[in-house]
């Protein structure tokens, strides 16, 4: 139960990130905000690696994956997310990003030759219907540029998972995450310096700086470490179930902090998306006892 509690804490922070991101992009430009948060996340990972001595030396073949991973999984992903969140409410963004597990399964079928089952296809159809409920029911169907950017953020995130799977065949997940974050951070800083007026960051109020640093350390740094540790305890499949709670957390936090209205189409769409994801990823437990059982040795090894 301790592991499930810690996983729930991670989801609480990650679901809130959509709302806090919407608040912060009003104080910082998207690329500068991403550069700031990635810088402090990188410092967190470096400090953790120095204390625990948990890192490996890279080979030339690793850089062939790390550089594209930093470009796609960090620079493109963060820029698309923070630019899109300026015009898309946190609830809608969370629901679009919840398509990542299905997208990952499809990409794994295309590039890693993993089997694409009927459950994945059926779950994808259900989830797409859920997205339609969110963006199209009760109003003229219109996909805004912000929604496209959030979709790109979801797609780049799913792509980075595929690339990470290949990378961790040689190095451990923490080292892969740390090095890809450092490379992506360097790219983000350079891109932000070229595109944005750097002196604009000093115009942000002190509370915005505190919130940006705190969310970087808690949501991207500490929660990432907690999540990876608990996966070893309960198994990857059971931990992934908690990811489906992010849209609900974004809804509640957005309503509480920003007064973002929660509509019935959003509620219905979120249920369809989460159900579709659980069908596609085979996360629907057959029995309650099975969900709370200890993970098998094989599941721990695979995670």
Image (cartoon, grey):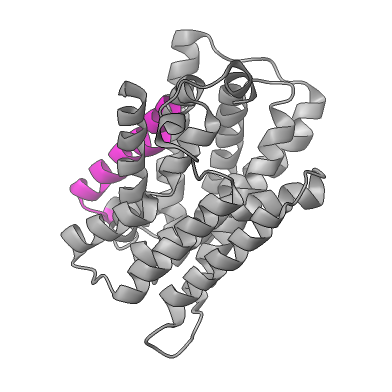
Residue 300's spot in the image, x, y percent? 57, 20
Quadrant holding the N terminus: top left
Q: Residue at x 54, y 35 (%)?
A: 237
Q: Which residue is drawn at 74% across and 36% down?
A: 65
Please say whether residue 19 is visible from this viewpoint. yes
- When asked about the image quadrant of residue 119, the answer is bottom right
> Is residue 225 located in the magenta-colored stretch of the structure?
yes
- Residue 24's place in the image compared with 83, above or below, is above
> What main secondary structure does the magenta stretch of the protein show?
helix
Given residues 295 and 57, the one toward you in this image is 295
Residue range (magenta): 203-226
- Residue 222's place in the image compared with 117, above or below, is above
Quadrant holding the C terminus: top right
Given residues 45 and 13, the one toward you in this image is 13
- When asked about the image quadrant of residue 40, the answer is top left
Given residues 221 and 275, the one toward you in this image is 275
Given residues 205 and 90, the one toward you in this image is 90
- Residue 75's place in the image compared with 26, above or below, is above
Q: Which residue is drawn at 82% across and 45% down?
A: 113
Residue 227's spot in the image, x, y percent? 44, 29
Please say whether residue 85 is visible from this viewpoint. no
Q: How many marks?
A: 0
> Is residue 153 located in the magenta-colored stretch of the structure?
no
In the drawing, does residue 144 fall left or right of residue 71? Answer: left
In the drawing, does residue 118 fall left or right of residue 135? Answer: right
Residue 297's spot in the image, x, y percent? 59, 16
Residue 279's spot in the image, x, y percent? 56, 53
In the drawing, does residue 217 fall left or right of residue 182? Answer: left
């Amino acid at each position: 139960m301790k592991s499930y509690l810690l996983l729930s804490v991670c989801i609480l922070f990650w679901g809130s990130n959509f709302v806090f991101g919407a608040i912060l992009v009003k104080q910082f430009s998207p690329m500068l905000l991403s550069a700031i948060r990635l810088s402090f996340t990188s410092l967190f990972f470096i400090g953790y690696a120095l204390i625990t001595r948990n890192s490996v030396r890279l080979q030339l073949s690793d850089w062939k994956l790390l550089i594209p991973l930093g470009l796609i999984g960090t620079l493109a992903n963060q820029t698309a997310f923070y630019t899109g969140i300026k015009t898309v409410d946190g609830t809608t963004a969370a629901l679009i990003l919840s398509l990542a597990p299905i997208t990952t399964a499809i990409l794994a079928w295309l590039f890693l030759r993993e089997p694409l089952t009927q459950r994945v296809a059926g779950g994808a159809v259900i989830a797409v219907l859920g997205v339609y409920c969110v963006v199209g029911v009760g109003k003229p169907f219109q996909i805004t540029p912000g929604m496209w950017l959030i979709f790109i953020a979801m797609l780049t995130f799913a792509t980075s998972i595929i690339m990470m799977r290949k990378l961790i065949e040689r190095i451990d997940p923490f080292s892969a995450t740390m090095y890809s974050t450092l490379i992506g951070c360097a790219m983000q800083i350079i891109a932000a310096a070229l595109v944005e007026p750097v002196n604009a960051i000093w115009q942000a109020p002190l509370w915005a700086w505190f919130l940006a640093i705190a969310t970087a350390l808690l949501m991207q740094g500490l929660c990432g470490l907690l999540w990876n540790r608990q996966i070893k305890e309960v198994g990857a499949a059971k931990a992934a179930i908690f990811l489906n709670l992010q849209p609900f957390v974004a809804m509640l936090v957005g309503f509480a902090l920003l007064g973002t209205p929660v509509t019935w189409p959003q509620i219905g769409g979120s249920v369809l998306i989460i159900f579709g994801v659980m069908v596609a990823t085979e996360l629907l437990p057959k029995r309650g006892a099975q969900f709370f059982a200890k993970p098998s040795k094989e599941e721990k090894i695979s995670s």
